[in-house]
Amino acid sequence: MHHQWLLLATCFWVIFMFMVASKFITLTFKDPDAYSAKQEFLFLTAAPDAGRSLRETHFPEELKLTGNMLPGGRLVQPLVYMQRLELVRNVCREDTLRNLSHTAISKFVLDRIFVCDKHEILFCQTPKVGNTQWKKVLIVLNGAFPSIEEIPESVVHDHEKNGLPRLSSFSDAEIQKRLKTYFKFFIVRDPFERLISAFKDKFVHNPRFEPWYRHEIAPGIIRKYRRNRTETRGIQFEDFVRYLGDPNHRWLDLQFGDHIIHWVTYVELCAPCEIKYSVIGHHETLEDDAPYILKEAGIDHLVSYPTIPPGITAYNRTKVEHYFLGVSKRDIRRLYARFEGDFKLFGYQKPDFLLN
């Protein structure tokens, strides 16, 4: 009798465990997140080897992008940043655009690149694309000031006081070492909108009180490029466009010196076909790109990019149309011919609404 009760109890226990297991299996297959998890794996790659930094991890075609780490050491590749670098490589190979996409790594280029040796970072300056804020980030990282808020505006662009060495200040061997091993980045924005920003900042508002733009550079442009000689107003945007689009603009550039950095092409500033940058940020998506750059450089726990006012980085077609309203189609086409390399290298749409 005792054995019968023991056998019966054992049967009930087996049946109970089977019911629990069945319920668990049912719940597992009905997990609503299962499809999302399956999609997620489309963007995953293997985690880097233990003991290797993310920056040392090698990806196909020498892409040194690291992405964001997920729980469990899985690595997500943000495709947009890979695509930007791939686009640059592809355009750099186009022979028809070679004159617009290639430039020598000259002292002019090396002067644009600021160095943070402590964190192995190179930043190429592209004026009128939020560079002041990135300079503040590097100034803090270099230890010149404890926080971004404590940096006086007068110091940011004073290269004797801001603690930002230029790459040109190093020996050839030291330059090559940094170009090969450091994290390198720069920021771009729509080329025509950048030119409008440069014109407003230097010739209209001039908030930093740089009188040479109005009193030396503007008269030089007006003398050569103003069509109506009886016009007595200060420099107009159409004068500026005519100067920039002139194939023979370089003789004036030489007179203006380094002041031209505010309107020369990204190619001339940063040599993207000659230098393999780690990340190329876009002004239009800076809210996403700034945190990504800080994370990729390994400094997101040390400093934050200053708050970006809502909508300030968005492309403004209405503003572009307004400024180009009084400019002839011929002059706009010549301007585009000079900046075509920038449009194509960085994926900006050809402004047909201005050209046709």
Image (cartoon, rainbow, N blue to C red):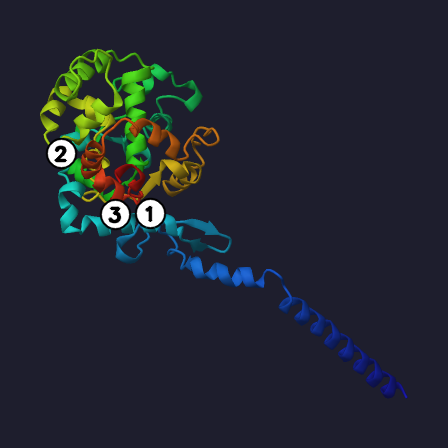
State whether residue 231 is above or below residue 339.
Answer: above
Q: Which of the 4 image quarters holds residue 176?
A: top left
Q: CA distance from mark 3 to mark 1?
A: 20 Å
Q: Position of residue 336 (x, y in %)?
A: 22, 37
User: Left of 316 or right of it: where is 194?
Assistant: left
One can see residue 174 in this view = yes
Give the residue drawn at x 31%, y 20%.
Answer: 201
Residue kind at label 3, given as amino acid type:
Val
Mark identifier at residue 350: none
Q: Residues within 10 Å of mark 3 (few under 14, many from 20)?
A: many
**For marks 3 and 2 on the same chain, the one whose residue lies earlier in the sequence:** 3
Image quarter (top left, top right, bottom left or bottom right) of the N terminus: bottom right
Mark identifier at residue 106: 2
- SS for callout 3: helix
Q: Position of residue 74 (x, y in %)?
A: 45, 56
Q: CA distance from mark 2 to mark 1?
A: 27 Å
In front: 220, or 334? Answer: 334
Q: Position of residue 278 (x, y in %)?
A: 30, 44
State whether residue 93 is above or below residue 33.
Answer: above
Disc 3 target residue: 88
| Tag 3 near tag 1, CB within 8 Å | no
Q: Which of the 4 image quarters holds residue 298?
A: top left
Disc 1 target residue: 55
Image quarter (top left, top right, bottom left or bottom right) of the C terminus: top left
Q: Which of the 4 image quarters holds residue 221?
A: top left
- SS for callout 2: loop
- SS for callout 1: helix
Q: Residues within 10 Å of mark 2 (few under 14, many from 20)?
A: few
In front: 282, or 355? Answer: 355
Label 3 vs label 1, nearer the camera: 3
